[in-house]
Image (cartoon, coloured by chain):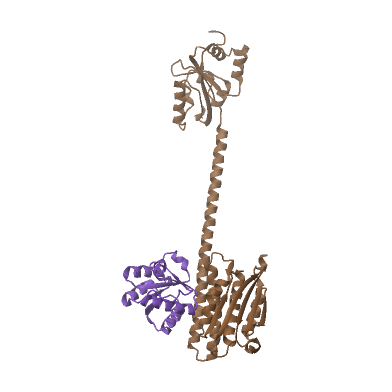
Chain colours: A brown, B purple
């Protein structure tokens, strides 16, 4: 064996005689804990430990030397890690692994172990060199990070669940309110109609009937708005298709209805006033435009003109000069207010014969622009 | 037609009853809960049931299931909450959404009368009535 034989080297190191050997001095003094074991001896005992190892483990050199390094293992040391190390030793391979070890006073620490066989030039393994690194702090940071992440994920999950529950409750509430509004509108209609049925006075009956028609109009608007997928806008022409015929038929007046409609989307807030306007003007035409039982035609047209929509209702009756009943009625006031409400204007004109009401209004909600 | 009205709102039931009678049909009963509606149905076997879904502490769907099992009796849902059906009609002719106008109730009753007594109905489907899948196949 020459001077650099590791056995000699360790012997000398053990004996604290490596002062003249810069390599041995470096190994002894490095901050990295290191040991050397001898697999040729029974149970692969430790034959060298450096100062850093002693500082890390709390074991003195005397306590360590001659023992297999399993004395560092303890209760919570992972058995699989241990058997992986054993396997590496048996098959003379190197291994890098982290396992839980214990110091002399029983404190656990995470040990990043690196172990490799040291062979002679002839290939015979004489030693195992191993370095230890206390990675407890890294592990702790990692664990803390995982914990933080889990806590964050929990918090997000919790918040999401809360929001989902809140949304569900809101949706339920909306359905409940919608349901009640519809039922109440139905009840109001029923009340007015029943009252009309029991009324002996023709004028009272007529007044109730007019009111009923207005309430029913609002009911249809509400139903259509909430049936559609878009509660923000309203197809006026579809509404006219549903209601105008019913309105004309309801009075057995022999009046023919003509519809010339293009799709007209109006903002939801204009739906009720427009529908009431339609109801008022058609009802008025049926009541006043035609001579008793003379019949006639009422035409409803919708069109788009740039940013404006146009709703025109025309009769071929007696002409608008004769519509005197109309001037100071509630119906007329209602019409004027509703037109103002939707930011539009109303023009009455002579349809020769008959009367034409033309309502021009912005197709977009002025508030939304 | 002999008609059973199942509706928990008295005012609405009264209005339906008046309209049904006005059109010359008979009302065999008015019930406000599922149990009493089922009992009344078994007793009278009406030609048509006008069936609300939200009833007194019960659901019109219970009545629908009973009727569906029992006979060839026909029924129409009258509801402010058609979404409750979730596309399932339980063999119903169709559904009328509340609020409906008196005119559309009349038009629907005319249509249903033709459909029940001499199917398929000759007149067009009225605006307020939406047919269920079974009847959409044979009446529409």
Is residue A339 positioned above or below A108 on the image? Answer: below
Q: Position of residue B24 (x, y in %)?
A: 40, 84
Is residue A2 positioned above or below A140 on the image? Answer: above
Front residue of B9 and A282: A282
Is residue A320 visible in the rendered image? The answer is yes
Q: Is residue B100 left or right of residue B36?
A: right
Name the image quarter holding residue B117: bottom left
Q: Is residue A222 left or right of residue A329?
A: left
Q: Position of residue A71 (x, y in %)?
A: 47, 25
Is residue A362 positioned above or below B102 on the image? Answer: above
Q: Is residue A119 left or right of residue B5?
A: right
Q: Position of residue B134 (x, y in %)?
A: 39, 67
Q: Which residue is most to the front?
A: A352
Seen at 56% across and 47% down, the residue is A152
The quarter in which the C terminus of chain A is drawn is bottom right
Is residue A175 positioned above or below A33 on the image? Answer: below
Is residue B59 visible in the rendered image? The answer is no
Front residue of B48 and B13: B48
Seen at 47% across and 25% down, the residue is A85
Total tally of numbered discs in the picture: 0
Q: Position of residue A102 (x, y in %)?
A: 50, 29
């Amino acid at each position: 064996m020459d001077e650099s034989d590791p056995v000699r080297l360790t012997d000398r190191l053990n004996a604290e005689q490596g002062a003249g050997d810069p390599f041995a001095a470096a190994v002894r003094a490095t901050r990295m804990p290191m040991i050397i074991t001898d697999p040729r001896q029974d149970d692969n005992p430790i034959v060298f430990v450096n100062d850093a190892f002693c500082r890390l483990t709390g074991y003195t050199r005397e306590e360590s030397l001659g023992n297999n390094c399993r004395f560092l293992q303890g209760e919570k040391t992972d058995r699989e890690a241990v058997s992986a190390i054993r396997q590496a030793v048996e098959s003379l391979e190197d291994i890098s692994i982290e396992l839980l070890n214990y110091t002399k006073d029983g404190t656990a620490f995470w040990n990043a172990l690196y172990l490799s066989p040291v062979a002679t030039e002839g290939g015979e393994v004489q030693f195992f060199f191993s370095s230890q690194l206390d990675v407890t702090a890294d592990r702790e940071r990692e664990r803390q990070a995982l914990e933080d992440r889990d806590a964050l994920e929990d918090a997000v999950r919790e918040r999401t669940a809360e929001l989902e529950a809140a949304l569900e409750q809101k949706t339920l509430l909306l359905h409940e309110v919608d349901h009640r509004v519809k039922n109440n509108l139905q009840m109001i209609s029923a009340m007015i109609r029943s009252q009309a049925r029991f009324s002996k006075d023709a004028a009272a009956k007529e007044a109730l009937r007019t009111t009923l028609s207005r309430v029913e109009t609002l009911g249809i608007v509400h139903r259509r708005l909430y049936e559609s997928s878009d509660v923000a806008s309203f197809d006026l022409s579809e509404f006219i298709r549903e209601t105008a015929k019913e309105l004309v038929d309801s009075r057995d007046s022999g009046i023919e209805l003509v519809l010339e409609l293009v799709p007209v989307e109006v903002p939801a807030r204009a739906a009720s006033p427009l529908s009431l306007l339609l109801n008022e003007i058609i009802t008025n035409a049926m009541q006043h435009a035609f001579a008793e039982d003379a019949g006639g035609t009422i035409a409803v047209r919708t069109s788009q003109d740039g940013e404006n929509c146009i709703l025109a209702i025309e009769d071929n009756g007696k002409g608008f000069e004769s519509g005197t009943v109309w001037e100071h009625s509630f119906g007329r006031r209602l019409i004027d207010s509703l037109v103002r409400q939707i930011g539009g204007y109303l023009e009455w004109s002579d349809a020769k014969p008959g009367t034409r009401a033309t309502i021009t209004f912005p197709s977009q909600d002025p508030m939304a622009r | 037609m002999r008609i059973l009205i199942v509706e928990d709102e008295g005012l609405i039931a009264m209005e339906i009853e008046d309209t049904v009678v006005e059109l010359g049909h008979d009302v065999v009963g008015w019930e406000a809960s599922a149990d009493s509606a089922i009992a009344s149905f078994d007793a009278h076997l009406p030609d048509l049931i006008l069936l609300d879904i939200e009833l007194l502490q019960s659901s019109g769907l219970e009545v629908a299931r009973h009727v569906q099992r029992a006979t060839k009796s026909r029924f129409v849902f009258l509801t402010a909450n058609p979404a409750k059906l979730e596309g399932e009609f339980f063999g119903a002719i169709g559904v009328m959404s509340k609020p409906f106008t008196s005119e559309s109730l009349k038009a629907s009753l005319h249509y249903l009368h033709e459909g029940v007594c001499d199917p398929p109905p000759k007149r067009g489907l009225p605006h307020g009535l939406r047919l269920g899948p079974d009847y959409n196949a044979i009446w529409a």
